[in-house]
Amino acid sequence: MQKHNVNLPIIVTARHMDVTDAIREYAHKKIESLHLDYPRIIEAKVILDVQNHHRHIAEIILFCADHIVIEVKSVTEDIYASIDESTAKIARRMRKYKTRLLKNHRPREGGSIRHLEEQVYHQEVLHTEDEHIEPAYVHKEKYSIRPLYADEAIMDLEISERPFVLFHNQKTNRLAILFRRKDGDYGLIEPEDKLAAAAK
């Protein structure tokens, strides 16, 4: 068992609020106390936000071994309670999925992991009349395209809370996008490469 996250890089940032030393120390202690058998945590990001004075949001993103990203978000009326709830969500989620994560040792075709740069912009950029404005980043990170089967992509989507997963489908040997539908089911899109098809 991963007893303690020694010297774990933990980045605490905030929007619409100041991060006090007490809040930063509390977030650090909660992340460091996470005892995950699997996966091993490599880096953690804690993003705090306050909206309308009563929506206190704590988003935690864990970058783990084997290119696994765990992302959770909680909203309460107290920032400490939101941090508590997010760390509890991580623990529950990983207990649920650990066995499935460990047992998936299927053969991989074209199994190298590729990285795309994900850029997130302020939504205000879309509403400006200035055509030459340079968008401001909220954050910038690498998005890993992993070789997965569809059921593994569903599990990946569940532990990350992202709206979609872009992956290399090991069954069809094509890039695919798995996303959450409004009815709670999952949708799968495999874009057709017309140029590659025409070249055959």
Image (tube, helix red, strand yellow):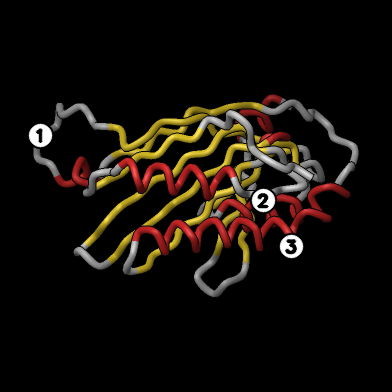
* Residue drawn at the location 29% of the way across and 65% of the way down: 55
Judge left or right: residue 80 versus residue 20: right
Separation of disc 1 and disc 2 at Cα? 39 Å
Name the amino acid type tagged 2. Asp
Residue 110 percent across, percent down from the top left: 79, 28
Separation of disc 2 and disc 3 at Cα? 12 Å
Question: Residue 89 bears which disc, if any?
Answer: none
Report helix, strand or loop for mark 1: loop
* Vertical order, 150 against 39 (above or below): below
- In which quadrant of the rendered view does residue 12 lie? top left
Task: Indicate the quadrant containing the C terminus: top left, top right, bottom left or bottom right.
Answer: top right
* Vertical order, 100 against 18 (above or below): below
Q: Residues within 10 Å of mark 1 (few under 14, many from 20)?
A: few
Q: Give 62 or 115, whichever is nearer the viewer.
A: 62
Query: Which residue is most to the bottom?
Result: 183
Nearest to N terminus: mark 1 or mark 2 = 1
Separation of disc 1 and disc 3 at Cα? 48 Å
Q: Residues within 10 Å of mark 2 (few under 14, many from 20)?
A: many
Question: Residue 130 bears which disc, if any?
Answer: 1
Contact between labelled residues 3 and 1, with CB atoms less than 8 Å apart: no
Residue that mark 3 sits on: 96
Nearest to N terminus: mark 2 or mark 3 = 3
Residue that mark 2 sits on: 156
Name the amino acid type tagged 1. Asp
Task: Indicate the quadrant containing the N terminus: top left, top right, bottom left or bottom right.
Answer: top right
Residue 128 percent across, percent down from the top left: 12, 42
Nearest to N terminus: mark 1 or mark 3 = 3
Residue 154 percent across, percent down from the top left: 68, 56
Query: Which residue is most to the left?
Result: 129
Residue 192 percent across, percent down from the top left: 63, 41
